[in-house]
Image: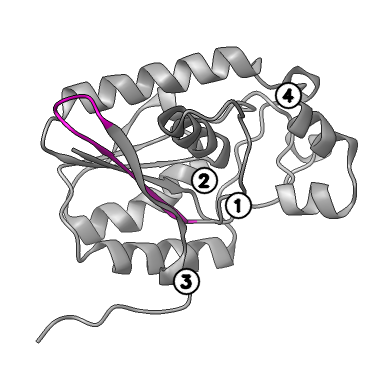
Amino acid sequence: MELVLVRHAEPVRLTADDTGGAPADPGLTGLGHEQAARLAAWLAHEHFDTLLTSSKLRSVETAIPVAGALGIEPAVDDEWIEYDAQADHYIPMEELRATNDARFQAMVDGRWHEFGGEPPAVFQTRIGAALDRVIAGAPGERVLIICHGGVINVALALVLGLDRHLWFDPGYTSISRIVASRAGIRSVAAVNDTAHLIARREASS
């Protein structure tokens, strides 16, 4: 089977003042909606048996045009939410890195509890179980999951046998692919593909 993992499109920036201390759940920016539309047009040329999405609004809004292009109903699966789903803010990682924000170093160090995150080992176990469940339940099928950067990092690291959690920076609406054989062999076929953001596929004649 083939499992295709897509990071959500660009979400709105939210601070703790914006959320009032509640868990941040931003929708997409205008650019994010454009990214989601480009993703949908790109993936419309492929067949998928199942479309899953994290319950976070940024993933659901990314999934809506994709579901329309594919002609399938998305199913919400909370096992694919991000490790910091309870954080009271959403600040893009690129901003945290550029401003040398202390939260970025905490993220890199695995001190996720400092900003409302799950412990890395708990998160890895959750994503590993979700990965096993989807692969076991869809032999010979193609499953598309719209989720989050940390989720994709951990899922690919598990397949590759990497002893790291956040080891690369998935772009918004980036596409990564895992192939799993019936014999139990798993491999990574593609990582962080964002060709759809700079090109468009033309319908075949």
Residues at marks 3 and 4, CA–CA distance in whole angstroms: 31 Å
Q: Earlier in the sequence, mark 3 or mark 4?
A: 4
Q: Nearer the viewer, residue 41 or 192?
A: 192
Mark sitting on residue 11: 1
For badge 1, the amino acid type reads Pro
Residue located beneath label 4 in the image: 110
Circle 4 SS class: loop
Residue located beneath label 3 in the image: 197
Circle 2 SS class: helix
Is residue 124 placed above or below 186 in the rendered structure?
A: above
Q: 10 Å neighbourhood of mark 2: few (<14), some, or many (≥20)? A: many
- Name the residue located 52 percent from the left edge and 31 percent from the top edge: 154
Q: Earlier in the sequence, mark 1 or mark 3?
A: 1
Residues at marks 1 and 3, CA–CA distance in whole angstroms: 16 Å
For badge 4, the amino acid type reads Gly
Q: 10 Å neighbourhood of mark 3: few (<14), some, or many (≥20)? A: some
Image check: 2 left or right of 178? left
- Name the residue located 80 percent from the left edge and 34 percent from the top edge: 16
Q: Earlier in the sequence, mark 2 or mark 3?
A: 2
Q: Quadrant of the C terminus?
A: bottom left
Q: 10 Å neighbourhood of mark 1: few (<14), some, or many (≥20)? A: many
Q: Point out the stretch of residues depicted in magenta.
A: 173-185
Q: Quadrant of the N terminus?
A: top left
Residue located beneath label 2 in the image: 58
For badge 3, the amino acid type reads Leu
